[in-house]
Image: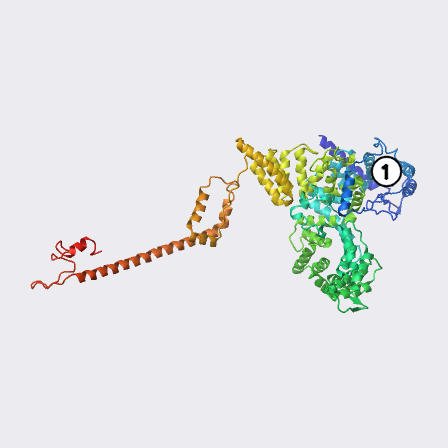
Amino acid sequence: MRRYLVSFFLLLQALAFSCAIAHAAQHVLDTDQAKDAKGDTFRAEVAAAQGNGHPVREPGADLVETALADLRRIYQPFHYRIPKKHGILGAIVELALKAMPTIRLSAPPAADSSKSSISGPLLQAVKLLEESSRKNNSDALYILAEMNFYGNYSHPKNFKAAFDYYQKLALLNGNSSAQYMLGLMYSTGVGNAVPRDQARALLYYTFAADQGHTRAEMAVAYRHHAGIGTPKSCETVAKHYKRVADKAIAWYRSGPPGGMSWIAESSRIADDVGGVYGEGASASSAGQNAVKAHPNSDAYASIEDIIEYLDLMSQKGDFKASFNLGRIYYEGQKGLERDVDLARKYFKAVTQRFWKKGRIVDNYKPGLDKTACKAAGFIGRMYLRGEGSPQDFDRAKYWFERGLSHSDAQSQYGLGLMFLNGYGVQKDVGRATEFFKAAADQDYAPAQVQLGSLYLDQGHADDLAAANHYFELAARYGNIEAYYYMADMNYLGVGREKSCNTAVSYYKNVAERAEPLVSSWAEANLAYEDGDTELAFLEYLGAAEQGYEKAQNNVAYMLDPEQSCLPIPQWLYPRAQKPELLQNPSLALIYWTRSARQGNIDSLVKMGDYYLHGVGTDADVDKAVQCYTGASEYHQSAQALYNLGWMHENGVGLNQDYHLAKRYYDSALETNEEAYLPVSLSLLKLRAKSAWNTFTNGRINSIQDEPVKKKDWSLSEWINNFIQDDSLYYDDMYDGLYDDTGMPGGDAGLVDDLDDGIFESVAIVCVAALLVFLVMYRQQRQQAARRREEEAQRQQWQQQNAQHQQPHAPAAGNQNPQPQGQGGNGGFFPNPGDPNFANWLAGGVGH
């Protein structure tokens, strides 16, 4: 009954929002309005209600303008990147500063210090804004809400007050930004302003998304994708992610030729220290993810050290170092802003070593020609896009043609863009296609996208297949346009089978890659590096609600109550207490879970730790075992394998089994060789316990010697061993038949072994039959030879017997001679009186 009442009130609230939007004669604040040129940090929304085609000033607008003037006089904290200390000495100093105890120099803040801590221009501005808010001025309500939520202009955070301002603004005119923030606060319960309520969160997110709020659209898409507070729905996910992807690709194409350029800021802050469990223990920095390099390599160097080294080599005349410096400054990276002027300087330094007064120098160094052409391609790109200098198509074409002399892919792509769009030249799609094809053949992703789009426009089956091929090639490099084309082709079933899940994956990538448009990653990273952990947490929290896995990992990591695997007493290692905002282990478990569902292995292991120790939830050993097993079986986390070994050793959640514990410890060492020390110590203790258990006849399964693995003979080895010594084969076979040790894994693999060896078994049977035939044939030949030998011996004996006999003349009346060996009685054997009788009796005759 209670649930129905809540649903009824929510429906009434939704109707109120709709009526307010339909009949409002006031301004509707636009959430995505950019900050003003003077760098105001609050995200003020601009009035948009219409009255006779002219903007209508709200009551209290003059007070808001006066308050803004006061706020601009306040020093706004400027977040800048602090250069990190490098080298051994710098690392020692940094660790020493962290180890020093912190002393509070001021009293703890009072329970209600929001008013007392405000003074000067800030206090005057707040009073003016509060007076304007009482007149239902939407600008004043939004500015006050942002100041209380984010702490803008050093205003104390008051999440309850922020919630009230957001709610009043949402009820007033259905402001989409206010609705989005209400959804965020209901989803997370941040600041304990309201209890977590995923149903209300989804409702407010949906209201904001229906008005086109970009971040709300991503939040709704992710919730339907992950099934948070609602059943999973691929079509709903695709619809919302496609809206954001359409905005992202339109923003990307609105930039200079070649699209917008920006530095990807999304990252996991835990990776700076080797992962959530530290260097070597985390799956992100161990095993196959470990840095495979010796200590003297540049794999461990910072970007500042690399730039310093390259600059030194560049001054010594190394053209490759100059080119690499140009690329670093042109492209930029996290922690290093782009500097196109400095990039142009290094690129031209390379080209001047190869071209002098328009001619190629003599006796240039090997490899300089190709490097100079690549540098020329970058210079042409900068003129084409107007980066660091006014846009100049003629200069761009000049440099591209220089790069074309050695088939530079970027130069070919740049000329293709010029002929495709008519930048300083007459449009020629044919020539553009030739240039794109030449660059695409060198695996240049932007050219592959352009070539794929040209094939896609043709619409024929073969053309669609070619377009799909080029988009897939470009998608390997994370090209945002390639992802967008692949998403549309999968969603609409163009050139391939329709696949909603695949389309959602591509749309999500497109939406998340347009970071400057849809997220606040840059602000969050700057705040974290500046030490403002609360502001960084709030910014990461918004990105986490949008579905960024890295932001979810950051939020959980910042909320993690114990980031060290070895708890150290407070008196031994004093640590600053976390702000109250960051003391929420139940919320940490939520985001560990969401991060793990998006494939983060360390997050999955962290979930197991929370369930095992009852952090942020009730202890549940079975769930801990499931988390560890999932992380160890499918992704081979050494930490998870070690934890399972520990659980088997101590009988926590699993049967106490020393033998299985040893197997898990051994597997952890095989997965990550850096686990040698903890595994060796654990095995030493485990063997001692196992020996005592065996000595006392305990009930625990002790460590046993692993059975010797039988040798898998190949066909040729089997034949050779069979011919040489049959006993090897038969001993092995009989040992298998009468083995009483059992089959640890059951007999499930027996069928697979038979299937895999059936061909070899048939071959062995055929060879055995051939051998039997040969043996029988040999025996028959031997028997025939023996019979011939016996016949020869018998004939020889008869000849010898005939020589010993004296022939007598037969009687006159007897003309027929007696047969040889017969007596006078005509028998076959000699008579007893015959001289041959003795020889016959001794075996000398007839044998």
The colour scheme is rainbow
Tell me if mark 1 has few (under 14), some (14-19) or many (20+) residues whose alpha carbon lies within 10 angstroms of its own: many
Label 1 SS: loop
Residue identified by numbered label 1: 155
Name the spot of residue 798 as percent of width and height, x first: 20, 60
Please name whichever residue, 381 or 102, is drawn nearer the observer in this view of the structure.
Answer: 102
Q: Is residue 544 visible?
A: yes
Please name whichever residue, 324 or 78, is drawn nearer the observer in this view of the structure.
Answer: 324
Which quadrant does the C terminus fall into?
bottom left
Name the spot of residue 60 as percent of width and height, x first: 91, 39
Which quadrant does the N terminus fall into?
top right
Name the spot of residue 801 as percent of width and height, x first: 19, 60
| Residue 154 figure quarter | top right
Q: Is residue 58 left or right of residue 550?
A: right
Please name whichever residue, 223 or 736, is drawn nearer the observer in this view of the structure.
Answer: 736
| Residue 525 figure quarter | top right
Counting labels gives: 1
Q: Is residue 655 visible?
A: no
Residue found farthest to the left: 813
Q: Amino acid at mark 1?
A: His
Q: Is residue 554 above or below residue 354?
A: above
Name the spot of residue 386 as percent of width and height, x first: 82, 58
